[in-house]
Image: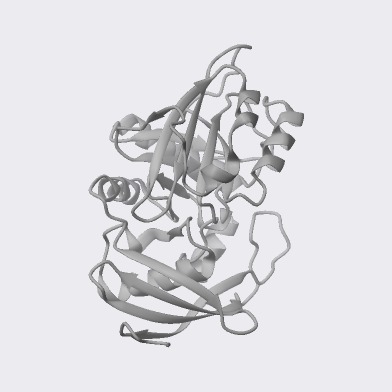
Amino acid sequence: MNTCTTISAELAEPLAATAASATTWLLIEQAGPWGAKALTESHLEAALGRQLDAAAAGTGVRIALIRRPGRHADAADGTPHTVLVGHTAPGRSWVRRLTVTDPAELLELDFAALGAGDHAGLGTAHSGGPIALVCTNGRRDRCCALLGRPLAADLAAAGHSEVWEVTHLGGHRFSPTMLVLPYGYAYGRLTEAAAKEVLAATAAGHTSPAWSRGRSYWDRPGQAAEQAVRELTGETAADALTLTQEPAGERRWRVRVTHRDGRGWTAEVAQLPSEPARPESCGKTPGTPARMDVVALTEGAQAGR
């Protein structure tokens, strides 16, 4: 049976530069079933979901629902909801944890400040290891359920990390997909062994470029440039690289990548269609999703100036 994931893999579609962009993730525990648009199609009140979505718009904050792996029994009214807030800026990443009885309390958050990396003492600091968020929303795409749920269950049973199911990370055709906090790197086409390697690397302050879809803090052109430099240099330290990005023509960008040791590179990135056509999600008509290609990479602190 062909699925969006098997077709994508057969076409060797690159994983790089496919991560959803978010400077900060707001993750709200909500048990029970999720619909395709989970913020308004779950046991979270639909009106509240719309209000939260509107409050986050334009701030860099991305909202998703989470639940523990396993059976998804409905939660009784008044059951506390765990809330995780994770900022993903290189060198300034953090995760805060709080509990709310009524998710409507979250409307009081300063979304602009959270998106900019200011938590203002919200909740308590997460002091444990990596937090794994595995996309499992079968209502969004069946591959996420068929491939994501077993992975989430296996990782949770292994006990090496805090594991949650999450509603949507984008890129269904790269399932199973996983976002890992605190650094905010997304990964795709994971096996159980690969996911455990990712979590071990994250715990040691590193990323795993072989399965990386990009750091969510960066827009997609920046994700492409960062990946190209990591592949060139073999650098895996999560916070070793920072970048700046500027337009360089229609669907083209110039991205300057700087290593903390002072080295620098300039990447020329172009947005091109993925060909031949392939479905972005199961059941969708095949299309040519945009891909970000690094068409030139020049080393040197003064490169591109």
| Percent position of residue 299, x then y | 32, 84
Q: In this image, 72 relative to 156: left or right?
A: right
Picture layout, residue 20 above or below residue 96: below
Quarter of the rendering containing residue 55: top right
Which color mode does the image show? one colour
| Percent position of residue 174, x then y | 51, 57
| Percent position of residue 278, x then y | 63, 68
The quarter in which the C terminus is drawn is bottom left
Residue 160 visible, this orientation: yes
Picture layout, residue 29 above or below residue 147: above
Q: Please name whichever residue, 2 or 68, is drawn nearer the observer in this view of the structure.
A: 68
Residue 137 visible, this orientation: no
Q: In this image, 304 relative to 157: left or right?
A: right
The quarter in which the N terminus is drawn is bottom right
Q: Please name whichever residue, 24 or 42, is drawn nearer the observer in this view of the structure.
A: 24
Name the residue located 60 percent from the left edge and 79 percent from the top edge.
272
Q: In this image, 120 relative to 50: left or right?
A: left
